[in-house]
Image (tube, rainbow, N blue to C red):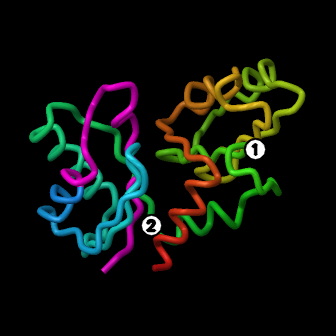
Amino acid sequence: MNTYIALFRGINVGGKHILPMKDLVQLLEKLGCEQVKTYIQSGNVVFQHKEQQANTLGTEISSQILEGHGFEPNVLLLEAADLQEAVENNPFNTENGKDLHFYFLASHPENPDFEKLTAVQLPSEAFTLRHKVFYLYAPDGIGRSKLAAKVERCMGVPATARNWNTVRKLVSMVGQ
C-alpha cells in the first residue's frame, strides 16, 4: 500500500463547491482508499491505496466528485516522500505557521516568471522555488500579498497552497 496526501483545490471555499469531509471519506473508500483521514474542510486528506500511479488515482477521484457532486476539483496527489522532501527543502526558519506557504505545483515549471513576482514583492516577503514546491514567506499576511496572487500564473503550472501549520499537520498524519 502507498500513502498519499490529496490536496483539493477550491472546495468548501466561499460557499461554493461544497463537499462535506464525511462524503469525501465515503467516496475515497469506495475507490479502494484505506485509513482515510481528513484535516480541515478545505480538502486535505491522507490515505493509503494500492495504486502505483498518483496521476491516475487523482483523475479518478476528481471524476467521481464530478459524477456525485456536480463539480470537478483539481486534486493534487503527493506521495509521503514528496511531502517529506518539501519539508526538508523548506528554506525558511519560522515557527509562525501562517507566515510561510508551500505552493505545491502539478509539475516543475519550465519557464517561471520571477521578474513579475519580484516586481510586486513586498520588502518583508521572500520566496524560492525548489523542484515542484514554491515557498513564500509573507509575514505581513497572505491576504495582502500581491505576490501570492500571482504565483500560479507566474509559475505556469497548476498549484495549490498550504500554510506551514497545515503542512506540519499533514506530516503528523502521515506518521500516524
The correct choice, above or below, for 52 with respect to 129 in the image is below
Which labelled disc corresponds to residue 138? none
Residue under the image location 30 percent in, 37 percent down: 73
Secondary structure state at the residue bearing disc 2: strand
User: Which segment is the magenta one?
Assistant: 1-24
User: Disc number at residue 79?
Assistant: 2
Instruction: Give the tally of numbered discs.
Output: 2
Give the quadrant of residue 93: bottom right
- Element under label 1? strand
Q: Percent x, y for residue 142?
A: 67, 31
* Amino acid at the residue labelled 1: Thr
Q: Amino acid at mark 2?
A: Glu
Disc 2 crowd, CA 10 A, few/some/many (<14, 14-19, 20+):
some
Q: Which mark is residue 128?
A: 1
Relative to 23, say whether 80 is above or below: below
Viewer-proximal residue, 103 or 131? 103
- Front position in the image: 13 or 101: 13
Determine the residue positioned at 50% across, 78% down. 175
At which x and y percent is residue 4? Answer: 38, 66
